[in-house]
Image (tube, rainbow, N blue to C red):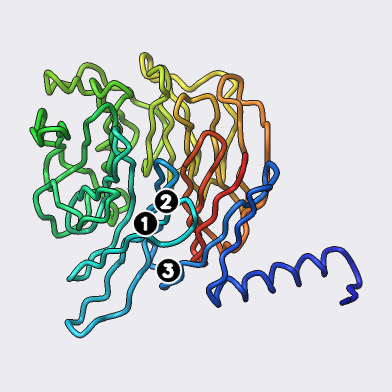
């Protein structure tokens, strides 16, 4: 029995021992995990590139693992599909340098949409090689959004909306991103739940709402914000969540009809190295910030749960991967699922 001077020292030792075992290939599985506890930890590794892909559907998790240069000189991301038993069931490595930045489950829950540097790919969960569904690109699209059997992204100088069942482009609208601070392009978009509207931010301080069928902007809202790096509609279409980087570094909640900030919305300032995710019916909002995931009741923004994230240095991306599960991909190379 090892003695410790304090409970904190004992906890530090336990975390260090757990991390050592994870890096040796052990996987933590805890089906009896209580709320706020991990039911799975798996070391992914591969080095931190800034690309932390995470998505889940039907009990499977998709993430990325960075690979060193091969004989052809390609240092690229490998896609990993992890099954319900936590085993890696499929993997795929690009033949060229290509980072995987984000992923979303398809509406029919049979696979994933992947945002690579080289374009948007569809990866079915049967393990078939991913197929590019967009034109080839030199730089990655700044966003990927999907709902109701449609996907949208920014491709060069235009926003594209595609119907996934037949690959038809139902909207292509020219939009050029503004430069922020002389070094970063402002371009972010998100489809409404029924895919009839696309909220788009191509200029700091302005969000436009585009009718997809008409390929026409139906309203524009101006507000006091700088660069937006992530947006998401609420399921009922009433609210738009927008994560501001630079400026005041906030998580905003805007009325999609008026552009006004939601009354009583928390401050959410200092939102650096953070991420957020609404659950499927927008009942709960999860925010990861300063090493913790905080869960809110989205109806009244009452905090209902808070717990620390293990094996994290500074940043991570999160996704709802079940009715009561949030999965996390950390910059320390760990893939985890927490019970909520």
Callout 3: few (<14), some (14-19), or many (20+) C-alpha neighbours within 10 Å?
A: few
- List x then y, in percent, for residue 234: 42, 24
Please tell me the numbered disc located at residue 199. none
Please tell me the numbered disc located at residue 48. 3
**Cβ–Cβ below 8 Å for labels 1 and 2?**
yes
**Cβ–Cβ below 8 Å for labels 1 and 3?**
no
Query: Tag 2's secondary structure?
Result: strand
- List x then y, in percent, for residue 5: 91, 72
Distance of mark 2 from mark 3, alpha carbons? 19 Å
Q: Which of marks 2 and 3 is in front?
A: 2
- List x then y, in percent, for residue 162: 15, 34
Q: Say whether disc 1 or disc 2 marks the residue closer to the N-terminus.
A: 2
Residue at 15% from the left image edge and 52% from the top image edge:
131
Q: Is residue 153 above or below residue 74?
A: above
Q: In this view, does 75 lie to the left or right of 5?
A: left
Query: Tag 3's secondary structure?
Result: loop
Residue at 68% from the left image edge and 47% from the top image edge:
32
Q: Say whether disc 1 or disc 3 marks the residue closer to the N-terminus.
A: 3
Distance of mark 1 from mark 2, alpha carbons? 6 Å
- The one of 52 and 270 positioned closer to us in this rendering: 52
- The one of 294 and 262 positioned closer to us in this rendering: 294
Please tell me the numbered disc located at residue 61. 2
Q: Say whether disc 2 or disc 3 marks the residue closer to the N-terminus.
A: 3
| Rendered-image quadrant of the C terminus | top right
Q: In this view, does 97 lie above or below 228?
A: below
Q: Which residue lies furthest to the bottom in this view?
A: 71
Q: In this view, does 223 lie above or below 140?
A: above
**Mark 1 lies on residue:** 81
- The one of 84 and 208 positioned closer to us in this rendering: 84
Distance of mark 1 from mark 3, alpha carbons? 19 Å
Callout 1: few (<14), some (14-19), or many (20+) C-alpha neighbours within 10 Å?
A: many
Residue at 27% from the left image edge and 81% from the top image edge:
69
């Amino acid at each position: 029995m090892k003695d410790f001077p304090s409970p904190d020292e004992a906890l530090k030792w336990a975390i260090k021992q757990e991390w050592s075992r994870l890096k040796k290939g052990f996987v933590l599985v805890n089906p009896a995990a209580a709320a706020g506890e991990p039911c799975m930890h798996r070391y992914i590794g591969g080095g931190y590139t800034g690309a932390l892909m995470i998505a889940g559907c039907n009990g499977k998790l998709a993430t990325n693992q960075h690979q060193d240069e091969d004989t052809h000189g390609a240092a690229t991301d490998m896609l990993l599909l992890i099954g319900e038993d936590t085993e890696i069931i499929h993997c795929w490595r690009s033949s060229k340098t290509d980072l995987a930045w984000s992923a979303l489950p398809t509406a029919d829950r049979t696979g994933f949409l992947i945002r690579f540097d080289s374009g948007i790919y569809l990866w079915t969960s049967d393990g078939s090689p991913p197929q590019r569904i967009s034109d080839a690109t030199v730089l990655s699209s700044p966003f990927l959004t999907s709902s109701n059997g449609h996907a949208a992204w920014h491709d060069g100088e235009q926003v594209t909306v595609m119907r996934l069942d037949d690959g038809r482009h139902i909207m292509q609208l020219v939009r050029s991103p503004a430069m922020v601070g002389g070094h970063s392009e402002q371009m972010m978009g998100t489809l409404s739940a029924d895919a009839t509207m696309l909220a788009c931010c191509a200029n700091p301080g302005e969000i436009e709402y585009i009718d997809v069928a008409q390929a026409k902007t139906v309203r524009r809202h101006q507000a006091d914000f700088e660069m937006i790096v992530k947006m998401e509609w609420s399921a009922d279409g009433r609210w738009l969540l927008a994560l501001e980087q630079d400026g005041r570094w906030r998580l905003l909640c805007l009325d999609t009809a008026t552009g006004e900030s939601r009354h009583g919305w928390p401050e959410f300032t200092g939102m650096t190295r953070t991420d957020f995710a609404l659950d499927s019916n927008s009942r709960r909002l999860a925010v990861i910030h300063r090493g913790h995931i905080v869960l809110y009741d989205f109806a009244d923004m009452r905090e209902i749960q808070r717990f620390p994230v293990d094996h994290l240095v500074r940043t991570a991306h999160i996704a709802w991967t079940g009715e009561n599960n949030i999965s996390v991909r950390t910059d320390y190379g760990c893939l985890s699922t927490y019970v909520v």
